[in-house]
Amino acid sequence: MKARVFITLKDGVLDPQGKAIGHALNNLGFGGVGEVRQGKVIDLEIHERDQGKARATVNDMCEKLLANAVIEKYEIEFRP
Amino acid sequence: MKSAVVVFPASNCDRDAAMALEHITGEKPAMVWHGDSELPDVDLVVLPGGFAYGDYLRCGAMAAQSAIMRDVKARADRGLPVLGICNGFQVLTEAGLLPGALMRNADLKFVCRPVALEVNETQSAFTRKYDKGQRVTFPVAHGDGNYFADHDTLDRLEGEGRVVFRYAQSDNPNGSARDIAGILSEKRNVLGLMPHPERACDPLLCGTDGRVLFESLLESLS
């Protein structure tokens, strides 16, 4: 089973990289760009058929390593 | 005073730390590879600066999971003094030995220069020989030194006298919350700081203000 983990900064945590991307988009002439937040995507292959179990495992991975709960939040998505 | 310096893949201040420790304590520190599972019998452990594991995922995230860190955590819990400098500070926050996180510098630039600091707290084994409020200069060299913690944690750190070093007000190089440059753990035996005291131990290189930190440890731990 394939899992995709989206890791982004928590609301309220400053994201200077997102801000710089926003400025660059404005400089390129893209008007009407509001706040920009950036993050990362991690694709994982999980050798597990049961989605519930796979979710619990990936959740544990996020808590222990993939995300830093002090500053980041995460979402998990599954594909067949 | 016996000490150890942990060497991670891509540590690059491990030898600077070893030189400072050897010159000031008179004893060569043990250099301990991150894959080892046990520290030797020492009075102090130093997690040095560098870019452990290439800063993959987040600075210090991989190093915090390395085999040696289990023993560092266990001994820190029992009161062993641990000093984390720069990348070492990042490893300590990722390992949960210190609160908060170190984020990308607010202006997104790597900063490498001497900075002015204030010694905010002298009630610690690391800073007892400084004067409270003393202005010192240590070099910084980091891209991710922007200390972040929620307001309650920041208030608690300040209330408990755990903010040991602050950037002098006009000289915050990374946007860190409340100008924080270095903090202590709750038991006051773990210190993490972004500036490099070990690189300020020789008059030829950025002055000698850092020597006092190692002299404080020598006095406290001998």
Image (spheres, coloured by chain):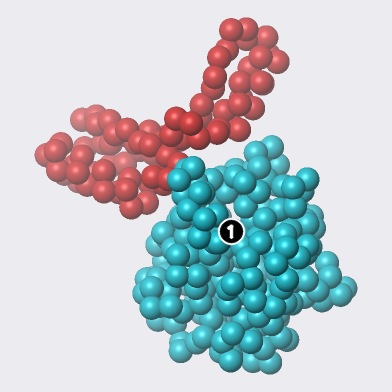
Which type of secondary structure does the marked residue at label 1 adopt? strand
The number of callouts visible is 1
Nearer the observer, A41 or B3 = B3
Picture quadrant where residue B212 is located: bottom right
Q: Colour of chain B?
A: cyan
Q: Locate the N terminus of chain A by quadrant.
A: top left
**Does residue B202 sit above or below B93 in this rendering?**
below
Picture quadrant where residue B75 is located: bottom left
- Amino acid at dot 1: Val
Nearer the observer, B158 or B99 = B158
The image position of residue A66, as x and y in percent, is: 38, 46
Nearer the observer, A46 or B187 = B187
Which residue extends farthest top? A31
**Does residue B103 sit above or below A34 in this rendering?**
below
Label 1 crowding class (10 Å Cα cut-off): few <14, some 14-19, many 20+?
many
The image position of residue B131, as x and y in percent, is: 73, 71
Q: Is residue B45 left or right of residue B67?
A: right
The image position of residue A15, as x and y in percent, is: 55, 32
- Taking the spot 33% from the left edge, 52% from the top edge, the residue there is A64
Q: Is residue B92 left or right of residue B147?
A: left
Q: Is residue A49 left or right of residue B74?
A: left
**Does residue A51 sit above or below B196 in this rendering?**
above
Q: Is residue B170 among the parts visible in the rendering?
A: yes
Q: Colour of chain A?
A: red
Picture quadrant where residue A72 is located: top left
Mark 1 highlights which residue?
B163
